[in-house]
Image (cartoon, grey):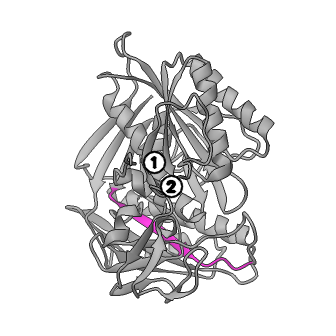
Amino acid sequence: MRLEMGIFPVRKVAFGSRTGYRDGSLTVNAQELKEVMMAEGGFLDVRFDLAHPGESVRIVHNVDAVEPLYKVSGRSCAFPGFLGRALTAGEGRTHKLAGMCILSTTRYPGPQTGIMTFRDSIIDMSGPGALYCATSETANLVACYEPIPTASNGEHDAAIRLATLRGASCLARCTADLKPEKIEVYELGEVGPTLPRIVYVDQVMHQAVMVATYVYGKDLDDSLPTLIHPNEMLDGAVVGANYKTGQKVPTYLHCNKPVLLELYRRHGKDVNFAGVIITRGHRDNQALKERSAQYVAKLAKLLKADGAVLAHEGGGNSSVDYFLTVQALEQAGVKAVPIMYETADPGSGDFPLVYTVPEADAIVSKGLQGQSIVLPAVERVIGSPKFKPYGGTLVDTASSFEVTNADLYADEWGMELSHFTGKDY
């Protein structure tokens, strides 16, 4: 499977009379884009704003972030299962507006309880909070959606997801006849037999609406772990819909998982990248968690893996699934390296992980979840003038106030993107 990714780096986005790309700048005809995004209905209106890295801008009500992709050649399309048939992605040529996102923001119309609760988050485009946000380094075209008051949260969520994906692909389509600045080729060719075979285990979330992940347009309810080629992920086969504060994982990240890209860079040098196993976290009971863990280990053995690197999405309950998977891999003879955030303050005496197993003896820490950060006042706010930190009280969004890093958008992955690490004390 060979994927050519044509890269069009975007450093600046501006509104103009026609949509087009030139020399690192993307011009967007907002009215045309609005018509594309509203074609299927499902919400009252969408308006647009812009936010660039380094600006004194704070964005709230963040939902998903999508890096624009357009399929130039190949059997599939960008974001298959949503924008076209669920044909296997990861082949042919795709053009990417690299370094920018359409960022969807909204308020949900219906009552929210328990799991099915949208937890608000902040993106600071500058200052100390920016380090913890997954899309503070991208040029963001912010789509602010107005819901239909009578719609359910699930209906509104589905409508804006489709609109955002359609808008993203529409923007990237302006590069269809242009020559990319560079072409990145992704292909798992044959390598030397002595290199260790490494699999990437991607544990994603599915619980309900607001806490979900889609593969080829379908959520992972009742799914078993499965194999997926890394090219499929790069090509938009996996779409994010998990909106639990710092645990949010936008589609942008599913298409740009840092460890997956690193394994590709090292393929044929010091590792043999054997493929990806995608699995769901937060199984409903112990038996289902153990079944899933054993299934991951079986797939890894079928791939003849020597080792596995594991990604984690979610919180406490999902940590049990995660470390049971580590245990199953180790017991099957596959060396497992989990990458996990910590939850205990240094010096507190508390155990730094929610759950672990004796076999987890090569853990990579990506920093502390829950630490306090004072955000500075900002010049401009996109979204509501009021913000409520998780577990806190309303504050003026433009003012300086204290949050935990869990209030920052996709913080669990933001820390990894910014190369945070845990330290021994």
Residue 221 screen position, x and y as percent: 74, 47
Depth check, front residue: 78 or 364: 364
| Label 1 SS | loop
**Do labels 1 and 2 touch, CB within 8 Å?**
yes
What amino acid type should be assigned to the residue bearing mark 1? Answer: Cys
Residue, disc 1: 255
Q: Residue at x 32, y 79 (%)?
A: 17
Is 105 magenta? The answer is: yes
Q: Main secondary structure of the magenta part?
A: strand
Q: Which of 174 and 333 lies nearest the eye of the viewer?
A: 333
The residue most toward the top is 193
Residue 315 image position (x, y, % from top left): 61, 53
Residue 417 at x, y = what percent?
Answer: 37, 52
Q: Residue furthest left?
A: 23
Above or below — where is 343 with respect to 112?
above
Q: Which residue is mark 2?
A: 251
Q: Quote the CA–CA distance across marks 1 and 2.
A: 6 Å
* Secondary structure beneath label 2: helix
327 vs 422: above or below: above
> Which corner quadrant holds the N terminus?
top left
Residue 207 visible here: yes
- In-image side of 374 versus 239 (left or right): left
Q: Is residue 229 above or below residue 205?
A: above
Residue nearer the viewer, 330 or 386? 330
Residue located at (45% from left, 36% from top) = 231
Q: Is residue 66 magenta?
A: no
Q: Which mark is residue 377?
A: none
Residue 149 sits in which quadrant?
A: bottom right
Q: Amino acid at mark 2?
A: Thr
Q: Position of residue 206 (x, y in %)?
A: 68, 51
The residue stretch that appears in magenta: 98-110
Q: Nearer the viewer, residue 24 or 119?
A: 119
